[in-house]
Image (cartoon, grey):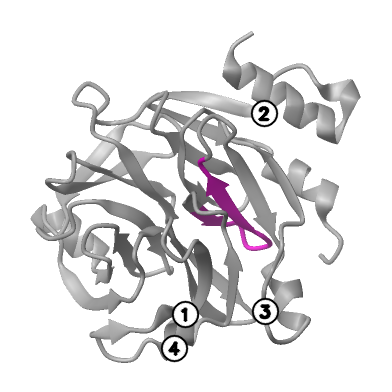
């Protein structure tokens, strides 16, 4: 039995023993840059397209537009020169946000202009106070927009940052402005939002998992807002990276198997832990 199949079996046993036959994750094939060993990094779902980044061994980062079904590459562009390890992406409905592990900066990009020119068109750049910015996703709650951002190894925390509190481009105190924050166990590599729940990918050397958070309930409980996982399940492979969701599916990439995976029936899983919808 392969490690991936075993992880899937454990996951399904924890939910419904009668259905425990195979992994819920479907293999979508290799990530771009596999031959060159360029590690997969950020992912986001944007207007019917999957956005993806890899870094060229900390020398440069590339943004790809992928077909969400076939994973074919439809377009690509280079990211800012100093953003050599772009680890997270977030789509707010009109604009693309990115965070970079090496520059520790948060970028706001014009996606269409970036793709048309083949290089990043930066609308804003904020320098974070994080030591290991490793994941990013867009969250919308009760009409307000937030960026969920994680800090790998350093503070070992993840934060829900109100976009309205960012201010003009410049330094930003992520921890000080956060509406919520929580411990991510040091190894947070991915964040995804499905409109109901936040998913966090935790890469723990072969025991990778995806944790599920109910941010709405955590915020309703009052300050301090420190959400705890309401569920968790095994990742698609042994080196989970970022996550992306369109509300019905959850995609991920893996830096050890060099593959993409998708969970097709996210709603079916969501029903098992849903208590507030």
- Which label is found at residue 24? 2
- Nearest to N terminus: mark 3 or mark 4: 4
Q: CA distance from mark 3 to mark 4?
A: 18 Å
In the image shown, does 74 or 135 lie closer to the viewer? 135
Category of crowding for the residue at label 4, using alpha-carbon neighbours closer than 10 angstroms: few (below 14), some (14–19), many (at least 20): few
Quarter occupied by residue 179: bottom right
Distance (Cα) linking label 4 and label 2 = 37 Å
Q: Residues within 10 Å of mark 3 (few under 14, many from 20)?
A: some
Disc 3 secondary structure class? loop
| Residues drawn in magenta | 191-203
- Residue annotated with mark 3: 225
Magenta residues, dominant SS class: strand
Q: Earlier in the sequence, mark 3 or mark 1?
A: 1
In the rendered view, would you say 61 is above or below 146? Answer: above
Given residues 154 and 66, the one toward you in this image is 154
Going from N to C along the chain, the mark reached first, 3 or 2, is 2
Tags 3 and 1 in contact by the CB under 8 Å rule?
Answer: no
Q: Residue at x 33, y 65 (%)?
A: 96
Give whichever of discs 2 and 1 has the lower sequence position. 2
**Sooner in the amino-acid sequence: mark 4 or mark 2:** 2
Q: CA distance from mark 4 to mark 1?
A: 15 Å
Q: Which mark is residue 95?
A: none
Judged by depth in the image, the label closer to the viewer, 2 or 1, is 1
* Position in image of residue 243 (x %, y %): 49, 47
Is 55 included in the stretch rendered in magenta? no
Task: Give whichever of discs 4 and 1 has the lower sequence position.
Answer: 4
Report which residue position mark 1 lands on: 175
Residue tagged 4: 164
SS class of the residue under badge 2?
loop
Q: Nearer the viewer, residue 120 or 179?
A: 179
């Amino acid at each position: 039995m392969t490690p991936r199949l075993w992880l899937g079996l454990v996951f399904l046993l924890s939910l419904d023993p009668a259905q425990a036959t195979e992994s819920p994750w479907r293999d979508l094939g290799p990530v771009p840059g596999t031959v060159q060993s360029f590690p997969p990094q950020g992912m986001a779902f944007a207007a019917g397209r999957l956005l993806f980044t890899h870094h060229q061994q900390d020398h440069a980062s590339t943004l790809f537009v992928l077909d969400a079904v076939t994973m074919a590459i439809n377009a690509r562009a280079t990211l800012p020169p100093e953003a050599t390890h772009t680890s997270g992406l977030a789509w707010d409905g009109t604009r693309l946000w990115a965070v970079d592990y090496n520059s520790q900066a948060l970028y706001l990009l014009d996606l269409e202009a970036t793709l048309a020119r083949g290089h990043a068109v930066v609308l804003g750049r904020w320098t974070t106070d994080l030591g290991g910015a490793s994941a990013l996703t867009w969250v919308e709650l009760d009409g307000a927009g937030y960026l969920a951002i994680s800090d790998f190894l350093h503070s070992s925390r993840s934060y829900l940052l109100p976009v309205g509190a960012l201010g003009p481009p410049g330094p930003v105190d992520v921890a000080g402005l956060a509406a919520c924050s929580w411990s991510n166990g040091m190894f947070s590599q991915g964040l995804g939002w499905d409109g109901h729940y936040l998913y966090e990918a935790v890469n723990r050397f072969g025991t990778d998992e995806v944790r599920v958070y109910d941010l709405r309930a955590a915020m309703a409980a009052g300050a301090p807002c420190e959400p705890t996982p309401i569920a968790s399940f095994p990742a698609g492979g042994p080196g989970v990276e970022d996550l992306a969701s369109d509300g019905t599916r959850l995609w991920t990439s893996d830096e050890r198997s060099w593959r993409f995976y998708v969970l097709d029936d996210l709603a079916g899983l969501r029903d098992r832990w849903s208590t507030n919808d």
